[in-house]
Image (spheres, rainbow, N blue to C red):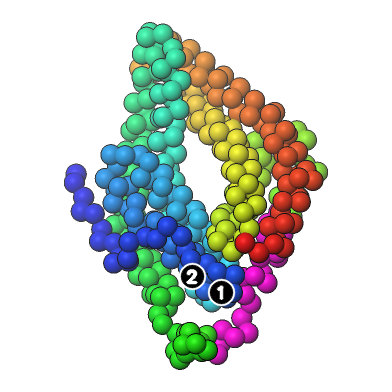
């Protein structure tokens, strides 16, 4: 059934950067960051609804993740009720987008795996591909229902209303005709003063995994990935107010995040496969899936398990880099050196 694409808000064409300056208040930096990534969210909304290019949904989901990370990072500097509303409803939006994107990833990884197999083995996995395609379609139906809902429309309206003051001219002028900061902003914390604390708190959270990293579970490593991502996003949000060293730190964290992301993708697929095989093992012989398909699924499960295990076992090398003296020194320079 064809659906009408919801009307997006009339924001200006997204800029390439949020426009954060070191002398901005952190509250202004928060609004600039949220406005930037909210524009990215809306930019990919129509493509996500259309569904032809699966990267559109990926980009929209990433933009929403960054919105959620920005709310978390800047939460102490935002109005309490507004921050609570955004945390709750951006999480709901992320959950609406997540399952459809997860099946996009699983289908893409399955296609890569099948491409390296003989033709007969590829055919044996066709029932799995069809099953996941059906689940993807159901996940997209649920996603589209949310994107057409009043709840999502209200979220966009409230985001727009909250972010609009960031573009409004300040009252009065200061020296040389420059816009004067409103009285309420004169004593608000500035980006240049808050950067060390914002970055240090996130790196300290990453370091808390050290005692439990030896033999850590996949779930524990996935939690570490999330905290690495939060540190990376903090650096990205503030990069205009940071020195050039920030780019290298972002690259290091992206490497760790990607490594653990590939581990988690394989783990998620293995969990889905394991549940499916358990279900089929309890079914009658005429369940519709021939022995060749079950054997192919067993082989793919073993492949996913091994891929997740290999990524987990090779992560300590990346971890040593993230916790080593060179990376710590780089963060110190970032936190103490102007751009």
Q: Residues within 10 Å of mark 1 (few under 14, many from 20)?
A: some
User: Which label number is shown at residue 31?
Assistant: 2
Determine if residue 321 is in view. Answer: yes
Q: Relative to the observer, which residue lies in front, 228 or 94?
A: 228
Task: Measuring from the top left, give residue 8's x and y in whole percent.
Answer: 29, 62
Q: Relative to the observer, which residue lies in front, 116 or 238?
A: 238
Task: Measuring from the top left, give residue 172's x and y in whole percent.
Answer: 45, 91
Residue at image point 63% right, 29% down: 311
Task: Measuring from the top left, give residue 324's x and y in whole percent.
Answer: 78, 43
Residue at image point 54% right, 30% down: 266
Left or right: 184, with 148 as reference point: right
Left or right: 46, with 112 as reference point: left
**Disc 1 element:** loop
Residue at image point 34% right, 55% down: 43
**Mark 1 and mark 2: span between their CA atoms?**
11 Å
Q: Which image quarter is the C terminus in? A: bottom right
Total marks in image: 2
Q: Which image quarter is the N terminus in? A: top left
Foreground label between 1 and 2: 1
In the displayed structure, 149 sits above or below 85; it is above
User: Which label number is shown at residue 24?
Assistant: 1
The magenta span reads: 182-203
Comes first in the chain, label 1 or label 2: 1
Does the stretch in magenta take in 189? yes
**Disc 2 element:** helix
């Amino acid at each position: 059934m064809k659906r009408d694409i919801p009307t997006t808000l009339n924001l200006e064409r997204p800029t390439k950067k949020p426009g954060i300056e070191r002398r901005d208040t952190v509250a202004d930096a928060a609004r600039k960051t949220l406005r930037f990534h909210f524009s990215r969210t809306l930019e990919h909304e129509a493509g996500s609804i259309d569904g032809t290019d699966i990267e559109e949904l990926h980009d929209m989901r990433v933009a929403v993740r960054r919105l959620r990370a920005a709310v978390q990072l800047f939460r102490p500097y935002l109005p309490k009720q507004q921050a609570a509303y955004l945390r709750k409803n951006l999480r709901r939006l992320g959950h609406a987008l997540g399952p459809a994107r997860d099946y996009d990833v699983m289908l893409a990884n399955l296609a890569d795996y099948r491409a390296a197999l003989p033709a007969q083995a590829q055919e044996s996995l066709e029932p799995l591909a069809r099953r996941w395609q059906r689940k993807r379609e159901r996940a997209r139906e649920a996603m589209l229902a949310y994107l057409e809902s009043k709840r999502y429309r209200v979220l966009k309206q409230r985001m727009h209303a909250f972010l609009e003051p960031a573009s409004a001219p300040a009252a009065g002028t200061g020296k040389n005709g420059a816009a004067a900061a409103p009285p309420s902003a004169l004593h608000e914390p500035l980006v240049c003063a808050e950067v060390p604390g914002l970055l240090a708190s996130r790196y300290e959270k990453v370091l808390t995994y050290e005692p439990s990293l030896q033999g850590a579970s996949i779930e524990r490593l996935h939690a570490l990935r999330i905290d690495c991502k939060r540190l990376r996003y903090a650096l990205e949000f503030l990069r205009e107010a940071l020195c050039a060293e920030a780019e290298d730190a972002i690259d290091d964290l992206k490497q760790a995040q990607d490594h653990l992301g590939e581990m988690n993708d394989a783990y998620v697929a293995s969990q889905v496969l394991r549940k499916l095989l358990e279900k089929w093992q309890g079914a009658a012989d005429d369940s519709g899936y021939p022995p060749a398909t079950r054997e192919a699924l067993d082989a793919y499960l073993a492949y996913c398990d091994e891929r997740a295990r290999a990524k987990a076992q090779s992560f300590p090398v990346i971890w040593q880099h993230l916790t080593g003296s060179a990376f710590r020194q780089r963060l110190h320079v970032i936190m103490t050196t102007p751009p």
